[in-house]
Image (cartoon, grey):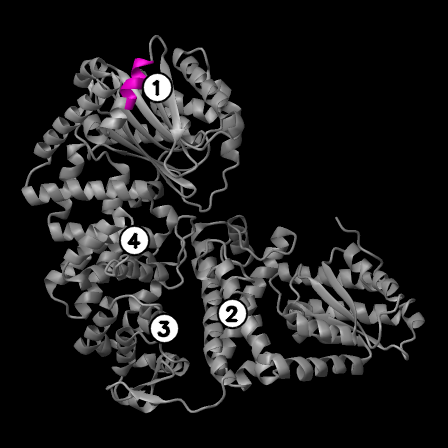
């Protein structure tokens, strides 16, 4: 902890003042914090300058000098732990005594915990360096006089203006634009980041700084208000910009306080704490955190949009005031100027409000953006899009054109969203605008995710030589669906229900979609179709990833729910687009393969009216022939003939002949051992595929999972197969060992410990007790969603299905499967899915006598409570809130 200095000294006064500012900040009285801290620093330099012992020895009259604030300090933007950048500027050469001056005024700031950057330069060197290095020039554009000789500071500013900006302004602007673009590429768009960077990300504070620097270069602006006075922003745009900046600065101050240092990235660890500190919640709860993040998102988006307006307004000025050529569009009131669409004035809009929609339709059709002035007019006159406008057939047809037109370099729907017109036309959309979901899984706010889902579908119509086979399949299906507008409506509205707090967002969204389309006078059949898609948009993904696709009941249930091949195609495509638009953690080869397999089996049944049993028999026959041929070539014919009758149809349908032969070879090496393993790299990933073949017994799968946890091998996925001769073939996909130099030795120990655990000579529970407790303690949930267990006895005719929703950590799969074993249940099928920091693990189980369990409501609730107690270390009655959470998932 830093020691406070005597209050009568300049540094003591500064420390006391800073502490008072912090107290006010924490009490919510943070108005003027930035300028207040800058003023405290100014006072410190004034006092230090006045009391300096070194200053008088430097003969100021012969070599005048000044202390100049740079960067954020120069702009009077001093957050709690912001850097303090100063320049000691000399008229002539820098004297030797300058080192003593630095020691006198800078060292105390370092000792007091301030991050200080300083430079000592002669005037001519400073100007020369600024001309050579635009980073230095940028810093000097923020220069502000603190103390010393004022004319020297004025001479510096004049030199920069006359000798650099007047001569090299165009080059400086181009450099700033290039750096700006690279920064955006590097730090990303804050609208699509789970952990936004408040300073450097797109929409962050640096976007505002770029506006200031460019405005100074273009027009010699002195104050931020010049952005309005010089015509770059309207009065309202400027007011909105500074309202957003004030909020971002407030968040940044609290982030600095929470981190105890300068920090610009709002990490997940801090988000819940800041939501409470800023008054969005009395305690850390999901609604408060999401409200805070949504508000922050709105302000970051405002800065981003104002920055975009400035950039489009500023660069034509740089090119001169030449009158641009006007091109007619054929629509009275709309014209083309400088490759953008604009209104001829406000009067045509007042006379014909439909122009508000027609200009976006033209934007989609001609692939031209709206001009800045057109966007302003849309915002100003969007109130004209009232109830009659929303049901006007011409407006609806124009919106359909926007919705169905192929994608382009910019999104017309996003432009409609940013101008506020989309929420005017579809008022329900306002409920999901800036709606944040507090998870690592969802990258985008709900409004942008919905538009992104539409874009993902429309891209399927475009040729793409780099598509993988799954996306080629989706693209082929997209060509077959009709009418496409129904699918695209469903994509736009699939998450509209998330604007309603609590309950099932799919059901709520379906009701809202119905009302929206009925208002627009769509035919009843079209309304029903979109309503179905919205209500069931999660159905196929959940079924594919959480149910056994080789259980006939799964396919029957899916076919009965969907009923129609065209519905199936659209629901499959909506599932793909929704997953892609959610983020990279929602879509991978595993999910894509399962979804496509479910589509294929369901389509087969819908098209033929039967299960794919004939096809399955032909597949089994082909698998048998291929396996026999491969086995003969490699000398394993006898082993295959012996084992083929004990291989289940589910196994033969799911596993390729090459894999079956590999399993047979592994089985022949089993001998008297209880288990053997084979390890190999998994495709193009850094994972390892671990196949375990052993003599099956209740708890076998759990014990293998426990041994992998014992060796710090985190399990990403797992697959269980049991042959009819009581041999288990289990496959796990895990992280490689920490010490890959001795990886072979690690796997030898793993095989040894699996045999010991299955034999009962290794007490896994004792060996893992401390490791699991430590791993569980390290879990930092990125949301406040409950960990729950849900038991389903209705989906499968022969098995009870257990679903576990939990936060992931090494050893979790062992804890779950061990709990299932302790409940005297045997696992027959597993589906392991990781969604960012959470897992959804599904197990098909029967009791040790081969019977379904939990078939009555009382037994089901008891089993859920017992499993939750074992897995999560709690034994509690399931309340209505937890039950609702389970049903919603």
Q: Nearer the viewer, residue 499 or 558?
A: 558
Q: Quadrant of residue 754?
A: top left
Which of the 4 image quarters holds residue 400?
bottom left
Q: Is residue 442 left or right of residue 391?
A: right
Q: Secondary structure at mark 1?
A: helix
Which stretch appears magenta? 662-669
Q: Position of residue 788 (x, y in %)?
A: 37, 37
Looking at marks 1 and 3 on the same chain, the residue that comes earlier in the sequence is marked by 3
> Residue 677 in magenta?
no
The CA distance from mark 4 to mark 3 is: 24 Å
Q: Can you say whether 786 is above or below 404 in the image?
A: above
Which label's residue is closer to the chain start, 4 or 3? 3
Residue appearing at x 75%, y 82% in the figure: 154
N-terminal of the pair, mark 2 or mark 3, is 2
- The residue to which callout 2 is attached is 244
Task: Please say if the residues under marks 1 and 3 sit with CB atoms less than 8 Å apart.
Answer: no
Local packing at callout 2 (Cα closer than 10 Å; few below 14, some 14-19, many 20+) is many
- Within 10 Å of the Cα at label 1, are there few (<14), some (14-19), or many (20+) other Cα atoms? many
Whether residue 828 can be seen here: no
Kindly report which numbered mark, 2 or 1, lies closer to the viewer in this rendering.
Answer: 1
> Residue at (29%, 52%) from the top-left corner?
467
Q: To which residue does mark 1 refer?
A: 700
Mark 2 vs mark 4: in front: 4
Q: Which residue is at 23% across, 45% downward?
A: 540
Please rate how many residues cluster around mark 3, counting C-alpha atoms within 10 Å: few if below 14, some from 14 to 19, many from 20: some
Q: Which residue is mark 4?
A: 578
Is residue 310 visible in the rendered image? The answer is yes
């Amino acid at each position: 902890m830093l020691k406070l200095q005597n209050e009568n000294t300049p540094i003591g006064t500064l420390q006391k003042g800073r502490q008072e500012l912090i107290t006010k900040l924490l009490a919510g009285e943070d108005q003027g914090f930035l300028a207040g801290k800058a003023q405290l620093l100014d006072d410190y330099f004034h006092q230090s300058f006045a009391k300096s012992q070194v200053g008088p020895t430097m003969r100021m009259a012969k070599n005048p000098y000044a202390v100049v604030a740079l960067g954020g300090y120069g702009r009077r933007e001093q957050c709690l732990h912001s850097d303090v950048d100063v320049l000691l500027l000399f008229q002539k050469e820098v004297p030797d005594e300058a080192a003593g001056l630095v020691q006198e005024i800078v060292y105390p700031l370092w000792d007091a915990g301030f991050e200080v950057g300083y430079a000592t330069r002669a005037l001519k060197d400073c100007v020369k360096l600024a001309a050579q290095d635009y980073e230095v020039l940028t810093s000097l554009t923020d220069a502000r006089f603190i103390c010393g000789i004022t004319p020297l500071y004025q001479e510096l500013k004049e030199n920069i203006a006359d000798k650099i900006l007047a001569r090299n302004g165009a080059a400086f602007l181009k450099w700033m634009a290039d750096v700006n673009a690279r920064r955006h590429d590097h730090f990303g768009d804050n609208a699509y980041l789970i952990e936004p960077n408040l300073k450097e990300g797109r929409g962050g504070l640096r976007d505002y700084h770029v506006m200031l620097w460019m405005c100074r270069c273009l027009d010699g602006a002195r104050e931020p208000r010049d952005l309005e006075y010089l015509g770059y922003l309207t009065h309202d745009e400027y007011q909105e910009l500074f309202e957003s900046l004030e909020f971002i600065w407030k968040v940044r101050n609290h982030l600095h306080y929470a981190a105890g240092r300068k920090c610009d990235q709002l990490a997940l660890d801090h988000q819940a704490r800041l939501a409470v500190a800023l008054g969005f919640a009395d305690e850390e709860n999901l609604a408060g955190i999401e409200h805070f993040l949504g508000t922050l998102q709105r302000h970051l988006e405002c800065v981003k949009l104002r920055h975009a307006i400035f950039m489009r307004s500023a660069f034509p000025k740089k090119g001169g005031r030449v009158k641009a050529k006007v091109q007619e569009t054929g629509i009275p009131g709309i014209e083309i100027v400088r490759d953008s669409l604009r209104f001829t004035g406000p009067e045509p809009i007042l006379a014909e409000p439909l122009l508000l929609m027609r200009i976006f339709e033209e934007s989609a059709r001609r692939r031209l953006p709206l001009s800045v002035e057109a966007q302003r007019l849309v915002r100003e006159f969007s109130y004209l899009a009232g109830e009659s406008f929303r049901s006007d057939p011409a407006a609806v047809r124009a919106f359909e054109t926007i919705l169905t037109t192929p994608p382009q370099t910019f999104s017309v729907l996003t432009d409609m969203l940013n101008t506020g017109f989309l929420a005017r036309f579809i008022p329900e959309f306002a409920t999901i605008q800036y709606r944040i979901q507090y998870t690592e899984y969802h990258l985008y706010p709900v409004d942008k995710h919905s538009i992104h889902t539409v874009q993902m579908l429309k891209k399927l119509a475009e040729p793409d030589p780099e598509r993988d086979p799954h996306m080629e399949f989706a693209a082929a299906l997209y060509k077959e669906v009709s009418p496409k507008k129904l699918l695209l409506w469903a994509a736009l509205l699939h998450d509209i229900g998330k604007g309603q707090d609590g309950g099932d967002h799919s059901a709520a969204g379906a009701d809202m979609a119905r009302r929206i389309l009925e208002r627009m006078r769509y035919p009843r059949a079209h309304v029903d179709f979109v309503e179905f898609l919205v209500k069931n948009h999660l159905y196929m993904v959940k079924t594919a990833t959480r149910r056994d696709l080789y259980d006939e009941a799964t396919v029957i249930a899916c076919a009965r729910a969907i009923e129609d091949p065209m519905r199936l195609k659209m629901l499959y495509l909506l599932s793909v687009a929704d997953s892609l638009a959610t983020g990279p953690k929602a879509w991978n080869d595993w999910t894509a393969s399962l979804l496509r397999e479910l589509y294929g089996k369901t389509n087969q049944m819908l098209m033929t009216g039967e299960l794919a049993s004939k096809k399955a028999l032909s597949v089994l026959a082909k698998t048998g022939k291929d396996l026999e041929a491969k086995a003969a070539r490699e000398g394993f014919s006898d082993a295959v003939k012996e084992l083929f009758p004990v291989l289940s149809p589910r196994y033969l349908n799911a596993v390729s002949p090459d894999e079956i032969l590999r399993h047979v070879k592994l089985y022949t090496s089993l001998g008297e051992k209880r288990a053997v393993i084979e390890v190999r790299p998994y495709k193009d990933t850094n994972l390892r595929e671990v196949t375990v073949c052993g003599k099956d017994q209740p708890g076998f799968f759990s014990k293998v999972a426990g041994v992998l946890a014992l060796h710090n091998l985190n399990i990403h996925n797992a697959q269980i197969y049991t042959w009819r001769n009581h041999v288990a073939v289990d496959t796990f996909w895990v992280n490689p060992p920490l010490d890959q130099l001795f990886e072979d030795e690690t796997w030898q120990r793993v095989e040894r410990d699996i045999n010991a655990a299955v034999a009962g000579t290794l007490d896994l529970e004792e060996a893992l007790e401390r490791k699991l407790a430590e791993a569980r303690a390290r879990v930092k949930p990125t949301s406040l969603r409950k960990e729950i267990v849900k038991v389903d006895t209705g989906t499968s005719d022969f098995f009870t299905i257990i679903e576990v929703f939990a936060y992931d950590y090494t050893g979790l799969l062992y804890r779950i499967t061990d709990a299932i074993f302790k409940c005297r249940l045997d696992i027959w099928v597993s589906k392991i899915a990781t969604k960012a920091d959470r897992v959804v693990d599904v197990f098909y189980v029967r009791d040790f006598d081969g019977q379904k369990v939990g078939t009555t409501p009382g037994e089901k609730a008891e089993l859920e409570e017992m499993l939750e107690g074992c897995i999560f270390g709690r034994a509690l009655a399931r309340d209505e809130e937890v039950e609702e959470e389970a049903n919603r998932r």
